[in-house]
Image: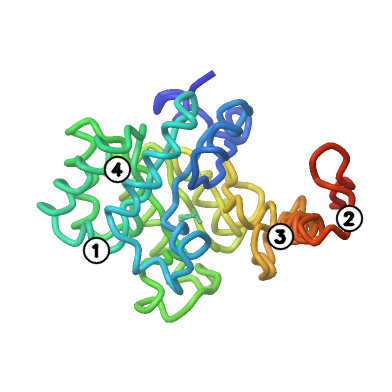
Amino acid sequence: MKLNTRKIKARKIHNGAKPISMLTCYDFQTAQLLNESELDLILVGDSVGNVVLGYETTVEVTLADMITFGSAVKRGAPEVFTVVDLPFGTYASLESGTKNAIKLFQQTKAEALKLEGASEEFCQLIKRCTQAGIPIMGHIGLTPQSVHQQGGYYTHGKNDSEAQRLILEAQSLEEAGCFALVLECVTPELATEITKKLNIPTIGIGSGDMTDGQVLVINDLLKMGPNRPPNFCHPVADFYELKRQGIELFLNDVKGKATPLKGNAKPLQS
Ligand code: KIV
């Protein structure tokens, strides 16, 4: 059954709730499949920039990109609560952030938006968006849109002062009105502590297994590309290899070297 922010907020594991499952999705057909599944939430992440558009970082992703991919996913998965990322630079000021959030929310028909960071200005924007009827999911720890400012991709919260800062950030985001919070590459101990301190659910990625939910990039889970997924992701399939085999079958078929694909092509090996 489709979730809503009230039901999502209640999904705290220490109250005995079932962990939240969230996967990224960027296209109509995968969204159709997720629409038939029991997945709780879809995230149209700005990771679309890395895994679909071939950008080096998510900094290059635009509002137009997120509208295109977000609306395609929503057309395929009308029954799944869908969160769309506000991309880099679109919420640098309160005014532009509000305007862009309204546009993205309206044009994708998403149920919520997500933004990275927890500065005072972002908390003000979150308050304004929630007052305007746009639910916001927070995101702290490793925030890829700030890769250059953070100085690379690494685990956050390893020392006391950083851990204290992240706890304060998490609490500010809850106070500002976020209905859930992504913790990306935060030490498992700190992710557990934040999860216990907050009343809203935490959704972890590379942050241990004690958060209220887990999110993965679907392309990593299914190994859609040639590169090894991050260490914390254990792929359940190798779709890159399956696609390679499928293309080879077609090429051999065209060359007349194999059983024609029509009818009785050799099944693909996973
Ligand atoms: O863009 C994305 O895919 C994300 C997840 C990694 C949480 O923000």
Q: CA distance from mark 4 to mark 2?
A: 63 Å
Question: Is residue 260 at all visible to an observer of this figure?
Answer: yes
- Name the residue that disc number 2 marks: 258
In percent of width and height, residue 135 lies at 31, 35
Q: CA distance from mark 2 to mark 3?
A: 21 Å
In percent of width and height, residue 179 lies at 38, 37
Q: Tag on residue 175?
A: 4
- Name the residue that disc number 3 marks: 240
Q: Earlier in the sequence, mark 1 or mark 2?
A: 1
In percent of width and height, residue 47 lies at 47, 59
Quarter of the image where one finds residue 230: bottom right
Secondary structure of residue under mark 3: helix
The number of callouts visible is 4
Q: CA distance from mark 4 to mark 1?
A: 24 Å
Q: Which numbered disc, 1 or 3, marks the residue closer to the eye?
A: 3
Along the viewing direction, whichever of 245 and 63 lies nearer the viewer: 245
